[in-house]
RNA sequence: CGGGAUGUGGCGCAGUUUGGUAGCGCACCUGCUUUGGGAGCAGGGGGCCGCAGGUUCGAAUCCUGUCAUCCCGACCA
């Protein structure tokens, strides 16, 4: 029945002003989605077809390796979350509500609590292990700032899988299986992904990887990949910026190593300022930043002047020292004054109140005869050294943001392999959770020796709505979307160019019905519109195959073109049939 | 949560400075003409101007409050 005149596809000529990124703009313009509130969208029939295709690919691949699909409730009682402890630690992103009896509930952002509860009840024996259970359904996160359309909504669709094991070795095997499955899933969706090491964040656990769709940014478009990825082509190293390590070139040393002294540096409150006004070499400056934890504990971070702090790394390092630091922020100028009686720009790691935790990046510890501020406005110490002029920091960690051009951390020293930087959209991730949740919630099975053991767990997520949006982000041109065949809402569109031409009509209907009989998902643009309107809509909506019954219709010739091709080719009906089916079966992404 | 901006038919906007009861383009409906890259003409339907107070003879316009949306930052399985 797919006659376009009957389908709910309302394209817009102009972009609603709130749509900022390409995928959001094109999905709204193409009649795929409509916003109903901040971060909440209607998925119109076209979009639901696309998401359904992503979901089906996910389902097929998961089932193929023995995972079992189930469905858990979105609405959950708070007590499960209190039991795991996440009721208190999850923070504002957890969508909380009360029912009519005033009982606390949550709309689930993820399902570790419920699945662990299921495992505890249903997986009683080691004989049931390993098991991998998954579902595909909506998730809720009360993002502080939803944006980028479907890329970061408050409601989104996700495939979440959880595996249960009796040993770490068994989890390791499953983890590798899932990594393969994920690569296959995204390949089938037409999306090349990069698997990168990542920080495991609030979900806990140790080992984790993210799957990134790398985005190429066209001229004048907003950057949409939210994650920065560092990678090395030679060693195959790749990691999210919140995790990436690198080897810095050594600091530039300066000739005369005279006595350390304090000099006047008025108005020089930045690294650049110090370099310009006083000739300080940035890599020899100790950059000092003050952060505050949620419990108002001050942290002082020390970095080389030519590098930047990576907040996630700093947060992890702070937790290592025993601080409660789930939510750190930079200190305001007045807080710095209260703590150190100095101005921003002259903060230094000396004469600190007891409350301070000092964490130095590894690279700063190697500095000799460095420049450093000393909590005296308008002054810096030069040719300073640890231990003699400045107290040696309490804690040393990697808290530095890697830079493109830094040396690869796993390549042979001296190989000269450097890191490159790109942006990516995180469409999936895999975690080794270990026994974090099974211990917190006391979920156990009976082992071979009759003892009660906590499950070893893994979890594996794919944002399926985000994956669909990432595909648009990755494959589009100025006219519209260029869907990968596997997730296109329809494979082909047939357009009679002139609706009042009987020969065109007849030919269009003929090829439309034959393609449909072959199993292709086709729409017939039977609308009483001019040719230009139908062409524009076809480009915008992004059907991979376009077939036009036009001027040569009377001779039985159709114009055939793939969405990403510039020119059409004339074919007979029979040739069009084989051509279209061939394109359908052997489609490969343009990359 | 801090900073900035914007709310006027489905979408994009004008009107607000200087108060007089709402307009344009697209979309939608009808008719005619047109028919290869978002057609033309004619006619038509649709808006408590985000909401609530206030000032005023009179408020889209001025004042106060409030809500919503977006951007930057912070933050983020």
Image: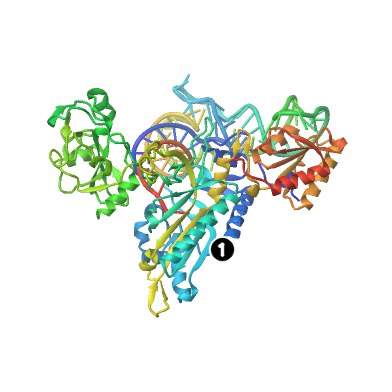
SS of the residue at dot 1?
A: loop
Judge from the rendering whether residue B41 lies leftward or rightward of residue A148; answer left or right: right
Q: Mark 1 points at which residue?
A: A65
Residue A73 x/y as whole percent: 50, 64
User: In front: B46, or A502?
Assistant: A502
Judge from the rendering whether residue A277 lies leftward or rightward of residue A419; answer left or right: left
Residue A259 x/y as whole percent: 12, 31
What colour scheme does the image use?
Answer: rainbow
Which chain letter goes with mark 1? A
The residue under the point 22% across, 26% down is A267
Q: In which quarter of the image is residue A120?
A: bottom left
User: In front: B31, or A458?
Assistant: A458
Residue A263 x/y as whole percent: 15, 27
- Judge whether residue A324 can be spotted in this image: no
Judge from the rendering whether residue A226 lies leftward or rightward of residue A509; answer left or right: left
The C terminus of chain A, quarter of image: top right
- Judge whether residue A86 can be spotted in this image: yes
The residue under the point 15% across, 40% down is A390
Residue B12 x/y as whole percent: 56, 32
A489 to A163, vertically: above or below:
above
Q: In which quarter of the image is residue B39?
A: top right
User: In front: B34, or A283?
Assistant: A283
A449 to A539, vertically: above or below:
below
The residue under the point 24% across, 33% down is A284
User: In front: A166, or A438?
Assistant: A166
Total marks placed: 1
């Amino acid at each position: 029945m797919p006659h376009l005149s009957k389908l709910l596809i309302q394209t817009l000529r102009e972009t609603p002003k709130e749509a900022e990124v390409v995928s959001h703009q094109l999905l709204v313009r193409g009649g795929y989605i409509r916003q109903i509130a901040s971060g909440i969208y209607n998925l119109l029939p076209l979009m639901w077809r696309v998401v359904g295709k992503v979901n089906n690919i996910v389902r097929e691949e998961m089932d193929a390796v023995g995972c079992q699909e189930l469905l858990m409730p979105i609405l959950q009682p708070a007590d499960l979350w209190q039991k795991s402890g996440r009721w208190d630690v999850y923070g504002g992103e957890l969508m909380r509500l009360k029912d009519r009896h005033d009982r606390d509930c949550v709309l689930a952002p993820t399902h570790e609590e419920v699945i662990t509860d299921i495992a505890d009840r249903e997986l009683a024996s080691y004989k049931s292990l390993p098991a991998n259970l998954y579902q595909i359904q909506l998730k809720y996160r009360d993002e502080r700032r939803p944006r980028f359309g479907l890329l970061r909504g408050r409601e989104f669709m996700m495939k979440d899988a959880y595996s249960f094991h009796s040993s770490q070795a068994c989890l390791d095997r499953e983890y590798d299986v899932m990594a393969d499955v994920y690569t296959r899933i995204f390949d089938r969706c037409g999306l090349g992904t990069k698997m990168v090491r990542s920080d495991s964040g609030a979900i806990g656990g140790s080992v984790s990887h993210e799957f990134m769709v790398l985005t190429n940014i066209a001229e004048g478009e907003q950057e949409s990949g939210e994650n920065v990825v560092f990678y090395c082509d030679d060693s195959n190293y790749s990691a999210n910026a919140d995790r990436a390590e690198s080897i810095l070139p050594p600091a530039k040393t300066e000739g005369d190593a005279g006595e350390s002294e304090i000099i006047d540096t008025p108005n020089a409150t930045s690294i650049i300022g110090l370099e310009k006004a006083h000739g300080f070499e940035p890599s020899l400056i100790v950059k000092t930043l003050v952060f505050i934890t949620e419990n108002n504990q001050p942290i002082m971070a020390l970095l080389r002047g030519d590098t930047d702090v990576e907040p996630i790394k700093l947060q992890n390092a702070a937790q290592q020292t025993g601080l409660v630091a789930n939510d750190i922020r930079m200190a305001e100028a007045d807080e710095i004054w209260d703590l150190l009686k100095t101005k921003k720009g002259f903060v230094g790691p000396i004469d600190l109140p007891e409350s301070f935790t000092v964490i130095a990046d590894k690279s700063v510890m190697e500095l000799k005869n460095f420049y450093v501020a000393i909590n005296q406005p308008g002054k810096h110490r030069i040719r300073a050294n640890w231990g003699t002029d400045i107290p040696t920091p309490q804690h040393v960690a990697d808290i530095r943001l890697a830079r493109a051009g830094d040396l690869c951390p796993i390549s042979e020293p001296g190989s000269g392999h450097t890191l490159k930087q790109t942006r990516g959209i995180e469409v999936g991730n895999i975690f080794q959770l270990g026994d974090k949740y099974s211990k917190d919630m006391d979920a156990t099975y009976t082992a071979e020796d009759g003892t009660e053991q906590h499950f070893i767990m893994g979890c594996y997520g794919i944002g399926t709505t985000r994956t669909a949006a990432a595909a648009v982000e990755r494959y589009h041109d100025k006219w519209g979307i260029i869907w990968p065949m596997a997730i296109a809402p329809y494979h082909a569109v047939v357009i009679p160019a002139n609706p009042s031409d009987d020969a065109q009509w007849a030919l269009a209907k003929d090829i439309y019905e034959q393609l449909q009989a072959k199993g292709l998902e086709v729409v017939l643009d039977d609308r009483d519109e001019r040719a230009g309107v139908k062409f524009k809509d076809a480009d915008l909506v992004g059907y991979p195959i376009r077939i036009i019954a036009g001027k040569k219709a009377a001779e039985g010739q159709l114009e055939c073109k793939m969405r990403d091709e510039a020119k059409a080719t004339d074919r007979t009906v029979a040739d069009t049939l084989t051509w279209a089916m061939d394109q359908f079966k052997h489609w490969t992404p343009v990359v």
